[in-house]
Amino acid sequence: MDLSSSSTELNNNKARERVYHASRLDMYRKPFGAQPEGSVVRLFLECPSAYHDVTLCYTYGLYSFSYHEEPMARCDGGYKAELMLPDESCLLFYWFRFVDDEDTVKYYVASGDKQNGEGEIYHEPPRVGADEDKYPYAFQITVYDKSFKTPDRIKGAMIYQIFPDRFARGDDYSFDRMVNASDRTERVYHRDWYEDVDIYGKPETGYLACDFFGGTLKGIAQKIDYIKSLGINILYLNPIFEARSSHRYDTADYMQVDPVLGGNPAFAELVRVCDEHGIKIILDGVFSHTGADSRYFNKFDRYDGIGAFKSFENGDESPYRSWYNFWRDEDGNPVYDSWWGFPDLPNVNEDDLSYRKFIFGDGGVVKTWLGRGAGGFRLDVSDELPDSFIRQMRKTIKRNSNGEGILIGEVWEDASCKCSYGSYRDFMFGNTHDSVMGYTFRHIVLDFLCGYISAEVMEARLEGFRERYPAEAYYSIMNLVSSHDVPRIMTMLSKPSDSDDREIQKDMAVSAAQYSDCSRMSRIAYALQIGYIGACCLYYGDEILMEGYKDPFNRRTYPWGRLTGRQEENLSYIRRLSRIRNDNACLKTGYYKTLFTEGDVFCFMRYLVDGRDFFGKEAYGSPRIILLINRGDDPAYVMVDDSGNETTVRRLKSAFVSLNDSFVMGAVKGARMTYGLPPRSFMFLIF
């Protein structure tokens, strides 16, 4: 008797007896991923013949949902159904109900972190809607506007994020001019560029994030060759409008660049210099709140005219009164709605039509700054703005930029099914944002590099987002590993203890024993940004391994003229990596395929088809590039087999090849090649 044949037959019989659906495999759901309105999706559930009453259950909508059931048709090996999706952008959730051979009603639902999007059997149906916060989950299809298109400039872009006060002083800098640019006495001014950030403030005010180092827009313009050497084509600036604080999220005047940064003439010069170098500027738009110290609210009477605060307090007329929500406490004192309870940040009523006219009308904020040369906006706290406000923002930007203006939202969670204020949000359907900031990407990459999840789980999570986001948005997502709002990548890789004490945070530093490993892991993080789908966003200073825990330590000054040898070496490394992406369109807008995942090893391929990218456009550079990653403590050996119809990768337990510290290798077409990856390393294979 052939025992191996019997074993194979038994396994096949068991496979045929399973209940199975995998949303990322064509056999079970086709086509893949998010779909345009009105398209047709074919679903298949593998199911034993003894099971009966197999039903497709689905619900769709956005602000309200309708529930439906459809008996599935029996076919070879299971049951099938075909759905014509709604002719309107929405979310569609589905799952399967069946009766097993013991006459028990069961459900096949989605399951997190599973390969290929496979689900599992559960004893109750999913809960969907705005209160969806408990297991089990439904499979999701994102139905988006069929006309949804994002600017080509943002797809696969190279973005550099700058916190303006901390990047560079211009040659016109003077300490006295910086101090005299404002009469705000609560500010702390640093003469020494290399001094650490302030955490105390002034005695009468305390800490208000009001310390200034004198970075300017001219300073940025004069470093444009440095920025371009990083392969950058988009510059994202944290707020530049006049404000009291150094972070400037407390806008004082939407129409003026802060005098400390050089004023409006400095912005005009920066636009000119950036245009000469093929770089577009994205501005940080803060529209959910203003500063209390602003010409609109004018709580401290620093601006001419009557602001909203005095209007409510004294009954004087003000054009800004209706922008804000006031009431009186039990003692008759004025009280107002503020962002997360911070009195310096009064909330704006974004549905107020006079406010919308100020933002979107002729001569308004959006048209003015697009007219001055901005390439678009990043929306601060986008999930705290009404969907209708963001839709109007998108329309205004597109109308005034020939469709080329960019709109990125600050959304930290899954933007395709984000819930806030009692409903799902209209974020990924082509009506609001082009895309969002990639905080989900950061979270997944850090979890992998810190050893909290395996390569298999990382792949499953990344593929889940690729499945749920429309391609136009996914190729435009601002993938980041550091920003002004989170600790820097080097600091996070050292696994610091969590603390809200700024005295403790100030002294947090990567130890000498950790430095080599953290820097190698940081390079892997950047390699993933370079190789994976989406725009690669580099936070200023990450290219030289700057450190810093939470705000304000992640906003330290760039140490011009004082780079260490290790920092210079990493800068050279980052420049070479950036050139790989800029020289090969497949890394920007090419197709994607996972080739191998196991433990510490993750391998994927970006490629063209007949010389064209994912969007059907002719592309330049290599037709295929493979990224091999080993985050582990031990060497990894992999065989890349390019000799057949498909490129495959498998791991070897050992191999008689040398470990290769070079991170760029040429690959031979039609060959089988074995590569040795040192611990905490990566390699690009360029065909």
Image (cartoon, helix red, strand yellow):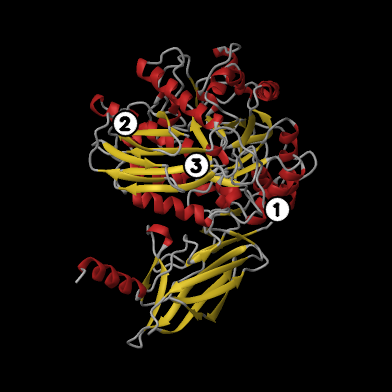
Q: Which mark is residue 352?
A: 1
Cα separation, mark 3 vs mark 1, equals 47 Å
In percent of the image, x 42 and y 42: which residue is there?
A: 642
SS assignment at label 1: loop
Residue tagged 3: 606
Q: Nearer the viewer, mark 1 or mark 2?
A: 2
Residue tagged 2: 518
Cα separation, mark 1 vs mark 2, equals 49 Å
Percent from the top left, x then y, of residue 161? 53, 31
Give amino acid for label 2.
Cys
Decide which of tag 3 and tag 2 comes sooner along the chain. Answer: 2
- Comparing 256 with 112, the one in front is 112
- Give the residue at the far front of this rendering: 1
Cα separation, mark 3 vs mark 2, equals 26 Å
- Mark 1 neighbour density, 10 Å: few (under 14) some (14–19) many (20 or more): few
Question: Looking at the image, can residue 499 be seen?
Answer: no
Give amino acid for label 3.
Arg
- Comparing 465 with 65, the one in front is 465
Q: Is residue 444 above or below residue 681?
A: below
- Comparing 210 with 381, the one in front is 381
Percent from the top left, x then y, of residue 560? 46, 15
Decide which of tag 1 and tag 2 comes sooner along the chain. Answer: 1
Decide which of tag 3 and tag 1 comes sooner along the chain. Answer: 1
Percent from the top left, x then y, of residue 291? 59, 39
Q: Is residue 569 above or below residue 421?
A: above
The image quarter containing residue 249 is top right
SS assignment at label 2: helix
Give amino acid for label 1.
Asp
- Comparing 263 with 656, the one in front is 656
**Residue 556 appears left or right of 230:** left
In percent of the image, x 44 and y 18: which residue is there?
A: 559
